[in-house]
Image (cartoon, rainbow, N blue to C red):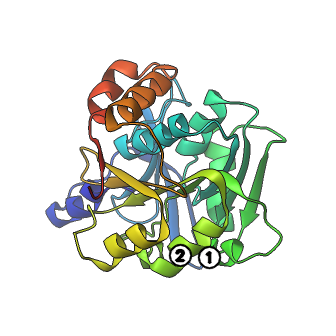
C-alpha cells in the first residue's frame, strides 16, 4: 500500500472502479474493483493494496512495487520469500523475470489468497508455494531454508505492520538470508538518523540502501554482507534489469533515487 493512499482518505475521495467482489473475513473487508484499465484490490475504504493493468498483468503499476523489483538486480540468487501477497503484483513480475525462481509466499489471510487466485491472475507454477501464516511465525520456523531475497510488504488496511520496523524482525529476516541475500522492505518513510530502525539496520546488516518513490513510500534494501559495487553501478544494474519488463525508460529516473542509508 502507498503512503499517498493513506492521506487520500482525508479528502473523502471516492474509490476507483466498480466493485466486482466483496468478501469479509475476521480482519475486515476484501474488495476487488474494476476500471476500464485496471483491477484494484482494497481492504477498506479507498486504500489500494494492489493494482493490476489488465492489458499486461505482469507489469507492476505502483512505483513501490517497481522499486522493490530492483533488488533482483543485486543478486544472482534464485530463491525468494514474499511476506504479504496482496493482489500478487510483485509475485507476477518476479515470475515473469525468472520462471525458474523458487518462491515461498506467506499471507496472513486465507481470503486474500483466495481472492488473488480468482481475480488477479497469479502464476501457476510448481516453483511457487503459499503459506497462510503470520509472517513472524513463519520466520521463526526452524525448518525453513535460506533465501536470496526476502520481500516484506506487510500492511493492514490503513497502516504498516509495526513489527516490520523492529530490530527483532530484522534479525529474524537475517537468519533466513543466504550469504548473498537482500532484505527488501516497503516502508513509509526514510529512517531518521539515530532512530531505532536506522540504528538496527546499521547493527544488523552489512550494507543498506534505500529508494524514495513518488508515492512517498521508501523501499529499503538491506544486504547481509557489504558489496563492492558503487551506487552508480547499483543504479545501472537496476535500470537494465527492469528494462526487461519494458519499463526501462521510466525506471531510469527511479533507479537514480537509490542512495546509501548512511555514509
- 154 to the left or right of 118: left
Indicate which disc residue 136 carries. Answer: 1
Numbered disc 1: secondary structure: helix
Residue 82: percent from left, percent from top: 61, 55
Q: Residue furthest front?
A: 228
Which residue appears at 39% of the width and 30% of the height?
233
**Where does the C terminus fall, quadrant-wise?**
bottom left
Work out whether residue 114 can be spotted.
no
- 231 to the left or right of 66: left
Residue 214: percent from left, percent from top: 24, 44
- 94 to the left or right of 226: right
Of 37 and 254, the residue lying toward us: 254
Give the number of marks. 2
Which residue appears at 53% of the width and 75% of the height?
169
Work out whether residue 14 can be spotted.
yes
Residue holding disc 2: 169
Q: Assess whether mark 1 and mark 2 are in contact (beta carbons under 8 angstroms).
A: yes
Q: CA distance from mark 2 to mark 1?
A: 7 Å
Which residue appears at 50% of the width and 68% of the height?
29
Circle nearer the viewer, 2 or 1: 2
**Where does the N terminus fall, quadrant-wise?**
bottom left
Rendered position, 141 above or below 222: below
Residue 151: percent from left, percent from top: 55, 54
Q: Residue furthest left?
A: 11
Which residue appears at 78% of the width and 52% of the height?
129
Mark 2 closeness class: few <14, some 14–19, many ≥20 residues within 10 Å = some
Residue 147: percent from left, percent from top: 69, 54
Rendered position, 83 above or below 18: below
Label 2 or label 1, whichever comes before in sequence order: 1
Amino acid at each position: 500500500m502507498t503512503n499517498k493512499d493513506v492521506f487520500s482518505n482525508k479528502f473523502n475521495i471516492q474509490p476507483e472502479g466498480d466493485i466486482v467482489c466483496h468478501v469479509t473475513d475476521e480482519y475486515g473487508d476484501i474488495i476487488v474493483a474494476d476500471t476500464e484499465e485496471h483491477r484494484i484490490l482494497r481492504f477498506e475504504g479507498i486504500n489500494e493494496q494492489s493494482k493490476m493493468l489488465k492489458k499486461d498483468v505482469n507489469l507492476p503499476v505502483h512505483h513501490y512495487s517497481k522499486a522493490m523489483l530492483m533488488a533482483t538486480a543485486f543478486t544472482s540468487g534464485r530463491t525468494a520469500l514474499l511476506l504479504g501477497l496482496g493482489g500478487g503484483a510483485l509475485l507476477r513480475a518476479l515470475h515473469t523475470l525468472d520462471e525458474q525462481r523458487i518462491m515461498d509466499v506467506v499471507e496472513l489471510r486465507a481470503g486474500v489468497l483466495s481472492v488473488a487466485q480468482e481475480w488477479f491472475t497469479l502464476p501457476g507454477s510448481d516453483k511457487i508455494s503459499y503459506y497462510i501464516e503470520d509472517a513472524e511465525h513463519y520466520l521463526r520456523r526452524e525448518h525453513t531454508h535460506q533465501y536470496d531475497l526476502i520481500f516484506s510488504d506487510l500492511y493492514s488496511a490503513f497502516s504498516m505492520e509495526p513489527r516490520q520496523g523492529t530490530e527483532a524482525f530484522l534479525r529474524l529476516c537475517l537468519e533466513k538470508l543466504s550469504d548473498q541475500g537482500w532484505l527488501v522492505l516497503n516502508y513509509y518513510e526514510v529512517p531518521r538518523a539515530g532512530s531505532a530502525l536506522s540504528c538496527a539496520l546499521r547493527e544488523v546488516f552489512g550494507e543498506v540502501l534505500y529508494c524514495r518513490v513518488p508515492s512517498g513510500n521508501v523501499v529499503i534494501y538491506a544486504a547481509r554482507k557489504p558489496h563492492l559495487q558503487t551506487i552508480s553501478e547499483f543504479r545501472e544494474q537496476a535500470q537494465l534489469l527492469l528494462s526487461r519488463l519494458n519499463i526501462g525508460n521510466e525506471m531510469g529516473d527511479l533507479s537514480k533515487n537509490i542512495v546509501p542509508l548512511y555514509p
